[in-house]
Amino acid sequence: MPNVADFCLGRTGIVLRVLTVYSTSLKSERHVQSKLCKSLPEEEVFKLRTTIDAFNVLRHVGTQKQRAVSYTDKRGHLLGEEVKFKYNENSTELGTLMISGYLKNVPLSVNGLVHIPKLGDFQISQIDAPGDPYPVEKKLKKDCNAMDDEPSTRVLARADPGKQESLESENILDPMDAEQTWPTEEELAEAKAQRKKIVKRVPKGTSEYQAAWIPDEDGEELSECSSDESEDEMSVDEAQSETDSGPDAEDEEEYETITVSEVPDERYDENIDMTEEKEAMENLKSMFIEYTYITLFNMYY
């Protein structure tokens, strides 16, 4: 009985009938009816034992309302009235399946796909409009004779290979997508050559490793200050510049320009000398104190 429920799932309207035999016991009938009601609890079960039962079934079929099914209303579907299969010229397995019938709901797209139950999805090559095999109004003999000269089948649309939907339902996985390979020696050399070089102005005695961790903003500020000082020196006479250049020359002697490359994060603590770092820090502190003392002395003076 579960197969019956699966088959009836999503149908617009179904009718359950049970062909009973006079020799069947009431216990068997109730057992069958309970099975049907368990699988399809919302449907009514009819017994076809007498003529009155048959009339009741026909009355129910004529008066019941069709249920709206969303997934069928949004798609066109066709029940094949006539099915033909034409093999290709050089193949006994491949060919073209020609199905004719009444199309319901949404019109088909010639560039879309059509699904055949238990067979899969297929592409459409052409859509034709044959003559109606069951016309509502019968034509007169004169009209029939006049229509004999006209073609019985009209071509509505042909598929465009460039616009047809693909039959691939899933993306093809790339076996090398998750693979990771080590860089070659040429790639390592190229990456090392392309490493960005930075020119910094640092105190004398600073190593290349220490200079790499000095912020770039400090170097930019120093360059701006030096440019401002050069403009001020050009605006005064030579005698005054000689007297003022004494402490500036001493400051210039305490700094030097060094070219360093960017240091990767993984080399942050590699090859570091703690003793050298402490000495450099003490030198920076002493230089800062002297610079502050000179600045304050000049201001008060």
Image (cartoon, grey):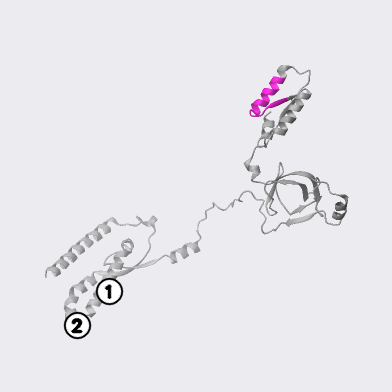
Asked whether 79 falls inside the magenta stretch, the response is no
Query: Overall secondary structure of the magenta stretch?
Result: helix
Please state the horizontal and vertical placement of residue 187, each as a whole percent of the image.
49, 62
Dot 1 crowding, Cα within 10 Å, few <14, some 14–19, many 20+: few
User: Is residue 201 at least partly visible in the picture?
Assistant: no
Q: Closest to the observer: 275 or 25?
A: 25
Above-or-below relation of 267 to 295: above
Give the residue displayed 44% in from the left and 66% down from the top. 193
Q: Secondary structure at mark 2?
A: helix
Q: Is residue 7 left or right of residue 215?
A: right
Quadrant, the N terminus:
top right
What residue occupies the far bottom of the structure in this picture?
238
Quarter of the rendering containing residue 31: top right
Give the residue displayed 38% in from the left and 67% down from the top. 197
Give the residue displayed 64% in from the left and 26% down from the top. 38
Could you tell me the amino acid type at mark 2? Glu
The mark nearer the N terminus, 1 or 2, is 1
User: Is residue 298 at least partly visible in the picture?
Assistant: yes
Q: Which residue is mark 1?
A: 227
Please state the horizontal and vertical placement of residue 230, each as a whole percent of the image.
25, 76
Q: Is residue 246 left or right of residue 56?
A: left
In this picture, which residue range is highlighted in magenta?
Answer: 29-46
Could you tell me the amino acid type at mark 1? Ser
Quadrant, the C terminus:
bottom left
Quarter of the rendering containing residue 3: top right
Please state the horizontal and vertical placement of residue 56, each as a whole percent of the image.
73, 27
Q: Which residue is mark 2?
A: 238
Above-or-below relation of 61 to 151: above
- Disc ID at residue 86: none
